[in-house]
């Protein structure tokens, strides 16, 4: 019988060796090598983290903050190295979400999905 931890470490290695992770790592390095892009990306990330913190604490996000986030998103999407990084992040996020669905499948089958629970 397989040890889940051993399999998890194998999965970690597979992720590190994946083309999606390599693309993410390369895109991140490219942004960090471009000082204006790096600063822009850091400012965007800080704003994202602050808004997430507020949401988690139940604080309301002001219209001004929402507009600022939207403006920063539009700006960074126009910056090619950041746009490439965000695309690579999205690809990696998709993989992680799909892996999470696979990993949690036994629990979902055991407890049933929320749709089944409501029926």
Image (cartoon, rainbow, N blue to C red):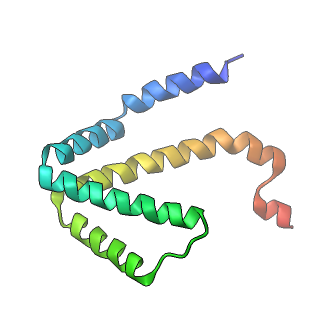
Is residue 83 visible from the viewing direction of this image? no
In the rendered view of the protein, which quadrant contains the C terminus? bottom right
- Does 3 sit above or below residue 60? above
- Does 74 sit above or below residue 43? below
> In x, y percent, where is residue 87?
31, 55
- Does 33 sit above or below residue 44? above
Residue at image location 51% in from the left, 28% down from the top: 11
Query: What is the total number of numbered labels drawn onto the structure image?
Result: 0
Horizontal placement of 41 versus 67: left or right? left
Residue at image location 27% in from the left, 51% down from the top: 85
- Does 86 sit above or below residue 47? above
Residue at image location 37% in from the left, 63% down from the top: 47
Horizontal placement of 52 versus 84: left or right? right
Horizontal placement of 58 versus 86: left or right? right
Residue most extreme to the right: 119
Is residue 16 visible from the viewing direction of this image? yes
Residue most extreme to the top: 1
Residue at image location 59% in from the left, 19% down from the top: 6
In the rendered view of the protein, which quadrant contains the N terminus? top right
Is residue 25 or residue 119 the one in the foreground? 25
Tell me the quarter of the picture where residue 99 sits. top right
Tell me the quarter of the picture where residue 13 sits. top left
Is residue 40 or residue 111 the one in the foreground? 40
> In x, y percent, where is residue 71?
28, 75
> In x, y percent, where is residue 37?
17, 55
Horizontal placement of 33 versus 100: left or right? left
> In x, y percent, where is residue 76?
23, 64
């Amino acid at each position: 019988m397989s040890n889940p931890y051993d399999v998890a470490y194998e999965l970690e290695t597979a992720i590190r060796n994946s083309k999606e992770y390599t693309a993410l790592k390369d895109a991140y390095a490219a942004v960090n090598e471009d000082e204006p892009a790096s600063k822009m990306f850091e400012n965007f990330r800080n704003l994202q983290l602050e808004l997430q913190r507020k949401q988690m604490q139940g604080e309301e996000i002001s219209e001004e903050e929402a507009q600022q986030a939207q403006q920063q998103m539009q700006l960074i999407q126009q910056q090619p190295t950041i746009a490439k990084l965000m695309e690579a992040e999205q690809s990696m996020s998709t993989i992680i979400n799909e892996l999470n669905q696979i990993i949690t499948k036994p629990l979902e089958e055991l407890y049933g999905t929320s749709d089944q629970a409501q029926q």
